[in-house]
Image: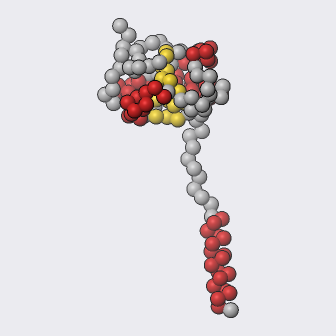
Amino acid sequence: MKKLNLAAFLLFVIVLTSCASKPPVEESGDPYEDISAETLAGMMKERRDSFLLINTHIPYEGDIPDTDLSIPYNEITAYLDQLPADKDAEIVLYCRSDNMSRTASEDLAALGYTNLKNLDGGFIAWRDAGYPFETAP
């Protein structure tokens, strides 16, 4: 009888712990991933040819070296012919502070793009981290 009670108790504990609520997974709800200047610098060093880098800032104030395109954030959907046809292609967007690139990222996500990255803090964060920035001549 003691073995049966012990087995029932252990089964109860196992069921109880498996039903315990798990802490919620923290999600930003954004359709893009924020990346730091350091992360972008690493991506550019290790695998620069694997993603499209787009400056969305207006008015134009300069570029991170090796930027592929400069497209005004509020016109990004008019430039789909310059973007990858593959909606899973990795696209990194930036602007001065990251407000415009967030808007552009949301617009692209609404069109089905799924692998979007936003430079958190924009090119201000990039420059503040000591990375090169090319200003307009």
Q: Is residue 12 above or below residue 109?
A: below
Total residue callouts: 0
Residue 22 seen by the camera: yes
**Residue depicted at x 52% and y 35%:** 33
Can you say whether 21 is above or below 31 in the image?
A: below
* 27 to the left or right of 53: right
Q: Residue at x 66, y 70 (%)?
A: 15
Residue 47 position (above or below residue 74): below
| Residue nearest the observer in this picture, 8 or 124 | 8
| Name of the residue lying farthest toward the left | 130
The answer, for residue 98, to whether it is visible in the render is no
Q: Position of residue 94 (x, y in %)?
A: 47, 24
Between 60 and 77, which is closer to the camera in this rendering?
Answer: 77
Q: Taking 134 as reference, is 24 left or right?
A: right
- The residue drawn where x is 68% and y is 92% is 1
Q: Is residue 16 left or right of residue 47?
A: right
Scheme of image coloration: secondary structure
User: For the C terminus, which image quadrant?
Assistant: top left
Residue 70 rendering spot, x and y as whole percentages: 49, 15
Which corner quadrant of the image does residue 48 belong to? top left
Q: Residue at x 31, y 28 (%)?
A: 130
- Please identify the residue farthest to the top as the structure is shown: 137
* Residue 10 relative to residue 52: left or right: right
The foreground one among 94 and 99 is 94
Q: Nearer the viewer, residue 65 or 26?
A: 65
**Residue 120 percent coordinates (x, y):** 46, 31
Q: Is residue 59 above or below residue 126?
A: above
